[in-house]
Amino acid sequence: MIVTTTKGDMDDSLLEKRVIESDEPDAFVTATEYWLDGELVHRGVHAALKSKGLFSPQAQGFNHG
C-alpha cells in the first residue's frame, strides 16, 4: 500500500507501522502512525463516536420550551 508521507509517497513495507488505540469518554480513537528511521512521517486518526445522543439538543444544553 502506498502511504503519503512527509518524505513523499512511500510503500508501507518500507515503514514501521504503529497503531495506538484509546478509549476516550465520547469516542473510540485509533491513530495509525508510520515511522521511517525513528522519524514520524505520517499519522492518520479515526474516531468512532460512542453515542449519537451526543448531538441531541438535550445533550448540547438546548431547551425546547
Image (cartoon, rainbow, N blue to C red):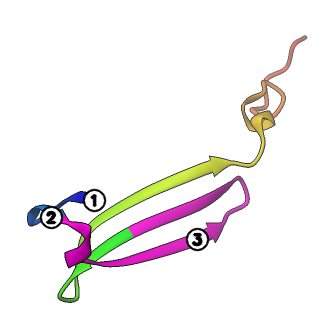
Provide the major secondary structure of the magenta segment.
strand
Furthest residue to the right?
65
Residue 16 in picture, x, y percent from top left: 30, 81
Residue 27 x/y as whole percent: 67, 54
Q: Is residue 30 left or right of residue 4?
A: right
- Residue 40 is marked as none
**From the viewer's perspective, is 28 left or right of 56?**
left
Q: Calculate the distance from the C-alpha at mark 3 to the C-alpha at mark 2.
A: 24 Å
Left or right: 23 as drawn, with respect to 45 = right
Q: Name the kind of residue labelled 3 in the image.
A: Glu
In the rendered structure, find residue 1 and report the number of the disc placed on it: 1
| CB contact under 8 Å: marks 2 and 1 | no
Which residue is depicted at the point 54% across and 63% down?
30
Quick one: SS at disc 1? loop
> Which residue is outermost to the bottom?
38
Labels 3, 2: front one: 2
Where does residue 50 sit, x and y in percent of width and height?
75, 48
Estimate the spatial distance between the alpha carbons at disc 3 and disc 1, rounded to whole Å. Answer: 21 Å
Q: Is residue 5 above or below residue 59?
A: below
**Considering the image in quadrants, where does the C terminus appear?**
top right
Q: CA distance from mark 2 to mark 1?
A: 8 Å
Q: Seen in the image, is 51 located left or right of residue 38?
A: right
Q: Residue at x 19, y 66 (%)?
A: 11
Q: Residues within 10 Å of mark 3 (few under 14, many from 20)?
A: few
Residue annotated with mark 3: 21
Q: Earlier in the sequence, mark 2 or mark 1?
A: 1
Mark 1 neighbour density, 10 Å: few (under 14) some (14–19) many (20 or more): few
Nearer mark to the viewer, of 3 and 1: 1
Which circle's residue, 3 or 1, is located before the other in the chain?
Answer: 1
Q: Which residue is mark 2?
A: 10
Q: Which residues are magenta?
A: 11-32
